[in-house]
Amino acid sequence: MKLFGYRVPMMASLVFWCVIWEVVGRSGVMFLIPPLSEVLVAAFHLVQTGSWQSAAVTTLNSFLIGMFFAIIAGVVLGVLMGRFKAADELFGIWVNIFVSAPLSALVPVLMILFGMGDTTVVVTVFLFAVWIIVLDTRAGIQSVPPSLVEMGKSYGASPFELYTKIILLAALPEILAGIRLGVVRGVKGVVIGQLLVSIIGYGALFEMYSRNFDMDNFWALTIILFIVAMALSALIESIEKRVDYYAGAR
Amino acid sequence: MRNITAQATAAASQPSGADVAVEVRGVCKMYNDVEALRSIDLDFPVGKLTTLLGPSGCGKTTLLKIIAGLIPATSGEIRVNGKVVTGPGPERAFVFQDFALMPWATVMRNVAFGLELKGMGKDERQSIARKYIAEVGLTGFENKYPHELSGGMRQRVGLARAFAVNADVLLLDEPFSAVDEQNRRKFQEDLLRLVELEKKTFIFVTHSIEEAVYCSDRIVILSRRPGRIAQVIEPDIDHNESPDAIRRDQGYLDTVEEIWQGLKRYVD
């Protein structure tokens, strides 16, 4: 961005909004918005408390387990749909419905099925993340050049080698894009799941702070969550960039 | 030039006294209701470069892929070294029109890939690959990735990969069509040198008449769909002459002209 002929660095916008937040917070117009400095101090103290740490561990645990199964199931189903027309026709419509459906509405049903505990949260993460991974994997598999598959066959690749040495690698850029979007959705899933179950992990803390109007800690919690979600997404994006570099000539 | 169309069938089953590497017997191919190839009978002599030439849609690539075992024939059979083809096999290697290189692998790994799939150890396959990388003139590019190379260089990688597996028969599907004209000429000359050097059987698909006449020992001209053998020509080009002399040679020009006269009726 340029302002009065000077190049303004990207970080400037972040600083600008932080200053606005601080000013609004200090003016005391809304008790919902405490000054940013106080939020940051609260965040600093919060991460040292036992309750935050155990909540973070519970949350991370549910998230990782849910994502693990979402990636496995998503890639497998995506490959099947990309390679076999029958699978595509069988699952296509459902995947497309679920990818855009408001899944939060399903969480109460999940609670009945899986109880008021971690399992429900894991299933929520899975359901939030898996569909976009399926769709992107399918798209990636379908864009694998047919000649590359023929090449593998003509040089004697076994069906297993055809997948591990050619098809999956050729579809890797799309698969990674799907996983990145899945991770972002998974973060939403873990928070929404825990909020609705409301007695575990991060959700329980959110519930407690907002109910008691403890806004410093509430915002601290939010900021930490945002940073983690962005960092995860950025991490996968950096892997994607390296893969794209090698896949440049497709 | 020798035009053996009149005795096409007889000549096809007994090609001028040489051994036969690939036999095509009564091959037909139907795509649903479309007849792509109709009863093709052909012999490909050992150590020769035979070109399949024809208008687009004549089924020349289909025939090549049937020989490769990549697509099944509707009827008829292919025999390579006397054995009936049921799928791809190590005695045949394919060179693809769009190169079919793995973009995530270096030149070295791409060239050695056929050997890797055979389960050969890393050192062994890399030393073989290095030899063929040198043979196609890519020494120094071993650790480059395909997108860092020009089209012509990429196809050299494809060619080196095919040579590296030491197949008896090399199947080339319009290998130069995605390579620019100047590189193509240089490449054709290099290919002829490699044909001489490697003593393998080459089956070469092209739609360029000049390319076919310049490179081939034998040209099989296919008619338009359904593809049938329209003509078999042996150009008799003396490849001891310089490439530029060949391209001005009267015999060469006459052969190109004759093939063009024959193919003209298939052009819209």
Image: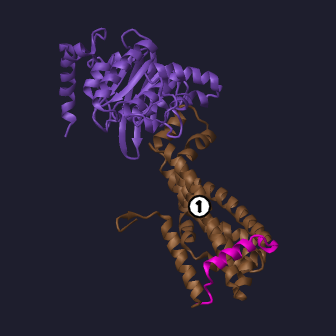
Location of the C terminus of chain A by quadrant is top left
User: How many numbered circles are shown?
Assistant: 1
Residue located at (30% from left, 32% from top): B180
- The kind of secondary structure the magenta stretch mainly shows is helix
Looking at the picture, how far across and down is residue B258, in whole percent?
19, 22
Which color has been applied to chain A in this rendered view?
brown
Q: Which residues are magenta?
A: A30-52
Residue located at (64% from left, 68% from top): A187
The correct choice, above or below, for A73 with respect to A147 in the image is below
The correct choice, above or below, for B101 with respect to B170 in the image is below
State the residue in front, B186 or A51.
A51
Q: Mark 1 highlights which residue?
A: A233
The correct choice, above or below, for A205 with respect to A61 in the image is below
State the residue in front, A119 or A185.
A185
In the shown orientation, is residue B245 left or right of residue A42? left
Q: Is residue A68 magenta?
A: no
Residue projecting furthest to the right? A50
Tell me the kind of residue under disc 1.
Ser
State the residue in front, B121 or B211.
B121
State the residue in front, A19 or A69.
A19
In the shown orientation, is residue B260 left or right of residue B64? left
Which chain contains the residue that carries disc 1? A
Looking at the picture, how far across and down is residue B124, in whole percent?
62, 21
Looking at the picture, how far across and down is residue B190, in whole percent?
37, 19
Q: What SS does tag 1 mark?
A: helix
Residue A162 image-quadrant placement: top right
In the shown orientation, is residue A143 left or right of residue A176? left
Q: Is residue A40 magenta?
A: yes
Residue B64 image-quadrant placement: top left
Q: Which chain is purple?
A: B
